[in-house]
Image (tube, rainbow, N blue to C red):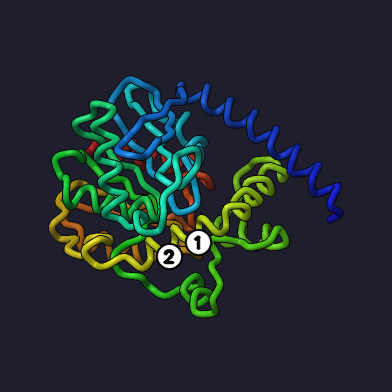
């Protein structure tokens, strides 16, 4: 691809993404806002009314990873889509504040800032580890957990860990030539959005490579006391674990581990889905969460 063609495609992708964001934000009845929490400025989208569902994205993602799912949530619910520190439009953080304990405390203080006593936590990937930390140390703040392709306290070796051993982080592509490989790694069923949008989103991730690498190092190197809780049996919150059978980032067996050790958990494996089920099949994920909440 020539440099000019690439610039044109990225400009088109940026414009198309803005249109899509506005459309899905309006369809879900969301509005943009910010909250100052300690020394963080956190960006989020909020419906403003109903039972709160705080949606926490994964590493390298942002609040928009939930936008395809949000319109499928009924108006009796209040989805709140949060940009974690160091992600999206929220303020940056250093690697020393990227571990699960620090991020879980930010989530709790964010709930305080919004005046929310108790919420459902819906969380993907790294966000799942943060949600487990909140449920373990602040159980009174969490009515239920819906964990979507979550990371857990035990890392099960897979394609991602093999790449780490080679000195490569599949979650942070280092060149635009690796765009297609990155999309295939993260999704088994790519979202139905224009190709230019997919390329623009990946290019943005590449542009943040150094910052994301620092956050990932901080997350992955955390001391056990600062990480995802290992005493899962202590988390009695009703929990739904949704995992894609074709997840190449977090091994699907993680869902079995969590469902076995969490006292009140059940798991659903989606046969044709990869690492971001809420993007790959948002309607199905929303239905699963709604059915779970009705019984929780």
The quarter of the rendered structure image containing the C terminus is top left
Q: Is residue 141 left or right of residue 89?
A: left
Residue underneath mark 1: 213
Q: Is residue 85 left or right of residue 18?
A: left
Is residue 66 shown to the viewer in this render?
Answer: yes
Q: Residue 116 bears which disc, if any? A: none
Residue underneath mark 2: 217
Between marks 1 and 2, how big is the CA–CA gap? 6 Å
As drawn, the residue found furthest toward the bottom would be 166
Please report contact status of discs 1 and 2: CB closer than 8 Å, yes or no.
yes
- The residue under the point 74% across, 43% down is 10
Residue closest to the eye, 68 or 92: 92
As drawn, the residue found furthest toward the front would be 39
- The residue under the point 50% across, 65% down is 248
Element assignment for label 2: helix
Residue 16 in which image quadrant: top right
- The residue under the point 50% across, 35% down is 67
């Amino acid at each position: 691809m020539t440099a000019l063609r690439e610039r044109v495609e990225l400009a088109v992708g940026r414009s198309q993404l803005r249109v899509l964001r506005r459309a899905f934000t309006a369809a879900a009845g969301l509005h943009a806002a910010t909250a100052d929490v300690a020394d963080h400025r956190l960006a989020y989208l909020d419906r403003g009314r109903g039972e709160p569902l705080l949606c926490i994205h994964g590493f390298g993602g942002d609040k928009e990873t939930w936008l395809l799912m949000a319109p499928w949530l009924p108006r009796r619910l209040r989805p709140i889509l949060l940009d974690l520190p160091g992600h999206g439009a929220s303020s940056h953080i250093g690697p020393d504040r990227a571990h699960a304990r620090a991020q879980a405390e930010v989530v709790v203080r964010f709930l305080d800032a919004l005046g929310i006593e108790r919420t459902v936590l819906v969380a993907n990937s790294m966000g799942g580890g943060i949600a487990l930390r909140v449920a373990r140390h602040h159980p009174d703040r969490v009515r239920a957990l819906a964990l979507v392709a979550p990371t857990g306290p035990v890392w099960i070796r897979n394609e991602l860990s093999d790449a780490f051993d080679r000195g490569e982080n599949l979650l942070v592509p280092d060149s635009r030539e690796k765009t297609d490989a990155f999309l295939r790694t993260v999704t088994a069923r790519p979202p139905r959005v224009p190709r230019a949008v997919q390329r623009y989103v990946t290019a943005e991730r590449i542009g943040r490579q150094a910052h994301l690498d620092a956050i990932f190092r901080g997350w992955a190197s955390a001391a056990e006391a600062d990480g995802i809780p290992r005493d899962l049996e202590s988390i009695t919150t009703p929990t739904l674990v949704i995992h894609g059978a074709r997840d190449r980032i977090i091994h699907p067996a993680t869902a079995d581990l969590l469902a076995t050790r969490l006292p009140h958990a059940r798991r659903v494996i989606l046969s044709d889905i990869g690492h971001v089920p809420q993007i790959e099949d948002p309607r199905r994920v929303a239905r699963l969460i709604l059915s779970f909440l009705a019984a929780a």
